[in-house]
Image: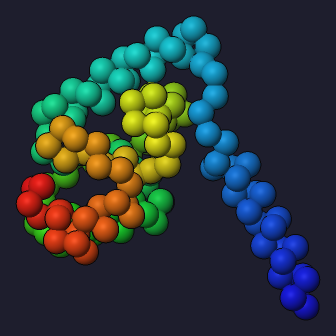
Amino acid sequence: MQAIFVVVGALLLIVLYLKFGRGPRELSADEQKIAHKLKDQILNDVKNNKIVMYSKTLCPYCVMAKRLFSSLNQNVKVVEIDQSENKNIFQNALFQITKQWTVPNIWINGKFIGGNSHVQELHSAGKLLPLL
């Protein structure tokens, strides 16, 4: 019985990796032009907003981060990259800037903080509110 759970678990991990975890890939010349424009958009968003979160709608870690900021009564500019026409290029552009492939990508006052776990750790340590 335990062997069945191990096999099912391994298959599930493979499916999740193939669907979500491929990481960055080489971009074509046309995609690189789009990525350059998206990087400009990202840097502009970060410059003009106190808190920016690049998210995916159904990502549970993104939902947790959104709830945390909401509980702190903070306005967050949320960009749902899975709703973008160029979602894969968008994620690649984020990676080029942050070297983080996963979401959420969270910025506070122009500084890249990291993902949900980073923000939760800062909050637990009492270091998040001073940043806000």
**Is 108 on the left-hand or right-hand side of 120?**
left
Q: In the rendered image, which quarter contains the N terminus?
A: bottom right
Inspect this view and state whether residue 30 appears.
yes
**Residue sitting at the far top:** 29
Q: Quadrant of residue 110?
A: top left
In this rendering, the answer to whether 84 lies above or below 15 is: above
Query: Residue placed at 25% from the left, 65% from the top?
Result: 122
Query: Residue placed at 30% from the left, 20% from the top?
Result: 40
**Is 132 on the left-hand or right-hand side of 69?**
left
Residue 49 horizontal/vertical position (percent): 14, 40
Inspect this view and state whether residue 70 appears.
no
In this rendering, the answer to whether 93 lies above or below 99 is: above
Camera-side residue of 110 and 27: 110
**Is 106 on the left-hand or right-hand side of 99?**
left
**Is 36 on the left-hand or right-hand side of 106?**
right
Q: Quadrant of residue 126?
A: bottom left
Residue 21 horizontal/vertical position (percent): 64, 48
Camera-side residue of 14 and 83: 14
Query: Residue placed at 28% from the left, 43% from the top?
Result: 112
Q: In the rendered image, which quarter contains the C terminus?
A: bottom left
In this rendering, the answer to whether 68 lies above or below 102 is: below
Residue 56 horizontal/vertical position (percent): 44, 51
Tally of numbered tags: 0
**Residue sitting at the far bottom:** 1
Q: How is the image coloured?
A: rainbow
Camera-side residue of 53 and 84: 53
